Amino acid sequence: MKHDNIFVGLDIGTTKTCATVVRKNENNELELIGVGLAPSTGIRKGVVINIEATVNSIKEAIANAERMAGVSIHNVTVGIAGGHIKSFNSKGIIAVKNREVTDKDIERVIESASAVDIPIGSEVLHVIPQQYTLDGQSDIRNPRGMSGVRLEVDVHIITGAVSSAQNIIKSCERAGLLVDDIVLEQLASAEAVLSEDEKELGVCLIDGGGGTTDMIILKKGTVYHTAVLQLGGQSCTSDLAIGINAPEVEAEKIKKSYGCVWMPYVSDDETIDVPSVGGRPPRKISRSVLTQILHARCEEILQMFLGELYKKRFYDMIGAGIVFTGGMSNIEGLEELAYSIFNLPVRIAKPDKITRGLVDTINDPMYSTSVGLALIAAKKGHPKVIMSKGTDETKLNKIMEKMKSMIKEFF
């Protein structure tokens, strides 16, 4: 099997590491050929806190994916997330040379928009063009070849901590992998679950993970806003462990088996068994108590995102509604709770862009990010120069330069 037709997305999360392997067949169609999962303990809220634990998790996930796919994995496109991720919109203006817009002019105007102050220790991850304006004519998607003298661009800039990106690269390299690119995780999830109509009409994607919950807003086919909330599924588990006096491991099992956030779905006479510690017999608690605890935390998270929509004045542009994905979206009643808060259409999304191969193995929202990373890798193809060769500084600089230019190909 040709390895230049194999593309791997690696999602290193707070609770799990997931590797998704796709292959381009002779008809240039994507097939899913392997998925690997492993528990993750070296990441907290999207940031590496233990290199060795992260390396072991990556190795296990990759080994599982290799066994299923029947290939050796050498290159990966990996996701990045965490509270260090910041974003803002910017504008650039240039004079057009020779009165006809060329690729060089487009590069210059994007560079002009990117010339902003970045906090020390941060680096620009993505520069995503939103719209171009040529001699006062706005809403231009691609000005290439058009005549004019004054070119403007609105861009969305995403920054992240240099140290966080370096630690992700180091972890992958110690696991024997070369990093082709690093991609913001909610961009990858959007690639995996959103339809073109949703991107055009205006959609808010909320990706609920273990340590963080990520938001991305798209309109007219491009990105207008991104945000990261440092609360996720683990926050729900911790609340539950305290509320029912159980170890977090047991609380996580109970959450997955009986968790619900919509009170009308739970009757007062429903009970569940809660394991005790110290050899004591299990206790019985009402499922409504469990639901009240989870409802409170999920409502808090959703209210924060509603506030973000109003604060940034994006609420009225969400024509296609709210889309939930990520492992946290599996909890029962989330769709109904979200509708009651946002008063917008809501749906739970699973990866659906790959229709060939072992697609039943990714029929779950928790695979959205890794599938999206693999899709982005397949669209770009393998780089001619391996991005993670060289010193730490040159490796990161190469990847950052690649990331700044690649997203405009997809949105």
Image (cartoon, rainbow, N blue to C red):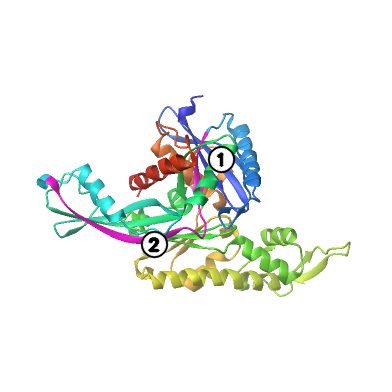
Crowding at label 2, few (<14), some or many (≥20) Cα neighbours within 10 Å? some
Residue 86 counted in the magenta span: yes
Image marks 1 and 2: residues in contact by CB distance under 8 Å: no
Q: Residue at x 61, y 68 (%)?
A: 261
Check disc 1 and report the residue beneath it: 172
Q: Residues within 10 Å of mark 1 (few under 14, many from 20)?
A: many
Q: Amino acid at mark 2?
A: Ala
Q: Is residue 261 above or below residue 198?
A: below
Residue segment shown in magenta: 75-97
Tell me, yes or no, if residue 195 can be seen here. no
**Quarter of the view holding residue 272:** bottom right
- Circle nearer the viewer, 1 or 2: 1
Measure how far apart labels 1 and 2 are at the Cα level. Answer: 37 Å
> Is the residue 365 above or below the residue 173 in the image?
below
Return the x and y of residue 159 as percentages of the image width and height: 42, 55
- Name the kind of residue labelled 1 in the image: Cys
In terms of depth relative to the viewer, which is nearer, 342 or 44?
Answer: 44
Mark 1 lies on a secondary structure that is helix
Magenta-colored segment: predominant secondary structure = strand
Q: Residue at x 40, y 56 (%)?
A: 158
Residue 111 visible in the snapshot: yes
Which mark identifies residue 320?
2
User: Which of 118/384 is in front?
Assistant: 118
Q: Residue at x 12, y 51 (%)?
A: 148
Q: Check if residue 388 falls in the magenta segment.
A: no
283 over 356 or under it: above or below: below
